[in-house]
Amino acid sequence: MKSIGSFIALLIIFVYPAWIFSQTNHSIQPDSSTTATFSFVGDLMCHSTQYKYSSVGRDSFDFKPVFREILPYLSNSDFTVGNLETVFAGKKAGYSGYPVFNTPDEFLEALSYSGFDLMITANNHSIDRGFSGVLRTIEKISDYGMTHLGTYLSQEDRDSIRIFDLNGIKTAILAFSYSNNGMHMPESKSFMLSMIDESDIIKELQNAKTQNPDIIIVYFHFGDEYKTEPTPYQIDIVKLAQRHGADVIIGSHPHVVQPVELFESVSGNIDTGFVAYSLGNFISNQRWRYSDGGAILNFSVTKNFTKDSVNISDLSILPIWIFKGNSDRGREYIIYPSQLSLDASLPAFFSSEDSTKMAEQFEDTKSIMISNPKIKLTELIQKKLTNSKFAPVK
């Protein structure tokens, strides 16, 4: 018995440490990393014609079919973001489109259903219905399971930096608007909209960096409407943000797409960032060239724990075009990937003009946004996109 016990003891002494080393070694990957995928879209607008088309009864609306052909491109990302250029002040306030927006709540329901996570609320229409509109908009965004950025309920809320943990990647996001359309903001409520101010931008970027994020994204609502090139003002503000630590800068307001440019980041753990000056319209009633569509901007962020590095990759653009007219379900707005213009199998209800405009939008967006070989076209999903869960619109 003693000799057997000694043998077992020897096994424990020599084999057990080797087993521990083997298990520990197995758990450590040579290049352990994690990745988060992002999708950003342009302006989410709701003109009066849009909610009239989406009416399914008295004071009842269904906007979900608008997104049925684009839904797979939104719901597959870890984090999907759009510029919400309207407010939700409620039915009693009276629904309205341009120039003072108030949209049915079902619009938010459709955005949530389509995979959106964050609504940027810093834009020139943010306070179209005053502070009560800001308050209710924030509440309804939350009710539909999304979060907001750019309008606030208090000074404390305004001063807090939003950090999103996405698959272990700490992402700080800031948002600013160039204007509030001259709407009155009383001094006691000056916190409710984040405005573009150089000192505020610098201060918020500095505060964001104290929280040691892996990447900082800044969203600016700025520029000249319907201009496909950034203004000197846009360029100056972007350079300011770059100098003070922004890794990704995304813009809106022109209602047309503008260029995407890469730049050397000043962040300690990322080398190359980029700016997308404008992503155009994602949904609106603006029907003229360049404004009848926009783009989904997709990219990945990978954090390598072993090398303590963060890199942006898979930067791609999906041009989109907005159909307006009579489909096989009635009158509708429908968002389509405009690469479909290269395919002969377009919907039967498309007119020749529809096909031409979709093709035009695709070529315009590609030529404006893709000037660097590191920026690709997003590949189309090779399957029928129409989701049968969507009820016909009457």
Image (spheres, rainbow, N blue to C red):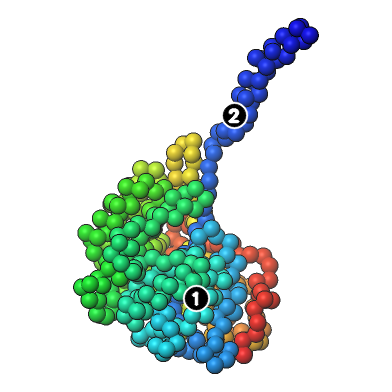
Q: Secondary structure at mark 1?
A: helix
Q: Residue at x 25, y 71 (%)?
A: 190
**Residue 360, position as x, y percentages in the image:** 50, 76
User: What residue does disc 2 label?
Assistant: 24
The answer to whether mark 1 and mark 2 are in CB contact below 8 A is: no
Q: Which badge, 1 or 2, is on the more N-terminal residue? A: 2
User: What residue does disc 1 label?
Assistant: 108
Residue 126: image quadrant is: bottom left
137 to the left or right of 388: left
User: Looking at the figure, which quarter contains the C terminus?
Assistant: bottom right
Say above or below: 119 vs 270.
below
**Residue 285, position as x, y percentages in the image:** 46, 84
User: Going by the picture, which residue comes out furthest to the right?
Assistant: 1
Q: Type of residue at label 1?
A: Leu
User: Pointer 1: residues within 10 angstroms few (<14), some, or many (20+)?
Assistant: many
User: Looking at the figure, which quarter contains the N terminus?
Assistant: top right
Q: Residue at x 36, y 75 (%)?
A: 134
Say above or below: 156 vs 305.
below
User: Pointer 2: residues within 10 angstroms few (<14), some, or many (20+)?
Assistant: few
Residue 276: image quadrant is: bottom left
**Residue 382, position as x, y percentages in the image:** 67, 65
Q: Type of residue at label 2?
A: Thr
Q: CA distance from mark 1 to mark 2?
A: 48 Å
Q: Which mark is residue 376?
A: none
Q: Residue at x 39, y 43 (%)?
A: 269
186 to the left or right of 327: left
Q: Between residues 223 and 244, which one lies in front from this camera angle?
A: 244
Q: Residue at x 50, y 86 (%)?
A: 51
**Residue 340, position as x, y percentages in the image:** 60, 72
User: Going by the picture, which residue comes out furthest to the bottom?
Assistant: 58
